[in-house]
Image: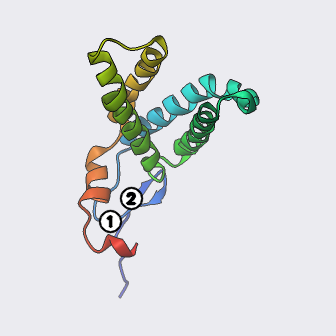
């Protein structure tokens, strides 16, 4: 008599849960596109500023280094799209918060400065990140999880 083991589907991050939580190849490529947008955009805009970071005002330097670090993590997301999904969620949340709490009130009360308008345009590209996120997977893995996730 031979024992049979349940078959498991592989994703870009290795074996998945046999309960059907795997993502399609097209969804993984969509996520990779989101990571690529982040990585390339930040590399083009932020990396050239890094050598002069020591001359910047404190919080400009802090935000530069934060965004540079995010670009490196986005590069890792190209290889491990599911494992780095929280990075896409972080990118979405901070941009939506900035648009809603800073840009929208400023725009409603007389308009945005040139610098705020530039940031608002850059933050509006979050729609592509939002489209790349597997929201059903996020819901099942992070919001409505079965079992005691406090122990994992």
Identify which residue is drawn at 41% across, 38% down.
94
The residue carrying mark 2 is: 9
**Image disc number at residue 104:** none
The crowding category of the residue bearing disc 2, from other C-alpha atoms within 10 Å (few below 14, some 14 to 19, many at least 20), is: some
Identify which residue is drawn at 65% across, 30% down.
57
Q: Do callouts 2 and 1 mark residues in contact (Cβ within 8 Å)? A: yes
Q: Is residue 18 above or below residue 134?
A: below
Pick whichever, 18 or 44, lies toward us: 44
Taking the image as shown, residue 90 lies to the left or right of residue 72, namely left
SS for dot 2: loop
Taking the image as shown, residue 145 lies to the left or right of residue 11, namely left
Residue 6, image x, y percentages: 34, 71
Residue 47, image x, y percentages: 67, 29
Pick whichever, 147 or 16, lies toward us: 147
The residue carrying mark 1 is: 18
Task: Give the mark nearest the N terminus, 2 or 1.
Answer: 2
Residue lying farthest bottom? 1
Pick whichever, 141 or 125, lies toward us: 125
The quadrant in which the N terminus is found is bottom left
The quadrant in which the C terminus is found is bottom left
Identify which residue is drawn at 35% across, 78% down.
4
Residue 54, image x, y percentages: 74, 33
Residue 96, image x, y percentages: 34, 33
Taking the image as shown, residue 47 lies to the left or right of residue 115, namely right
Identify which residue is drawn at 40% across, 21% down.
120
- What's the distance in space between the residues labelled 2 and 1, CA to CA? 7 Å
The crowding category of the residue bearing disc 1, from other C-alpha atoms within 10 Å (few below 14, some 14 to 19, many at least 20), is: few
Taking the image as shown, residue 142 lies to the left or right of residue 91, namely left
């Amino acid at each position: 008599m031979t024992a049979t083991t349940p078959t498991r589907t592989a994703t870009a991050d290795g074996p998945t849960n046999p309960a059907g939580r795997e993502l399609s190849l097209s969804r993984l490529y969509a996520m990779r596109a989101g990571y690529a947008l982040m990585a390339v955009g930040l590399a083009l805009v932020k990396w050239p500023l890094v050598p002069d970071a020591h001359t910047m005002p404190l919080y400009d330097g802090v935000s530069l280094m934060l965004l540079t670090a995010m670009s490196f993590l986005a590069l890792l997301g190209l290889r491990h799209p599911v494992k780095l999904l929280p990075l896409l969620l972080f990118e979405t949340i901070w941009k939506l918060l900035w648009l809603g709490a800073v840009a929208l009130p400023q725009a409603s009360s007389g308009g945005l400065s040139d610098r705020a308008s530039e940031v608002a345009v850059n933050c509006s590209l979050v729609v592509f990140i939002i489209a790349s996120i597997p929201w059903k997977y996020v819901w099942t893995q992070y919001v409505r999880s079965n079992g005691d996730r406090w122990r994992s």
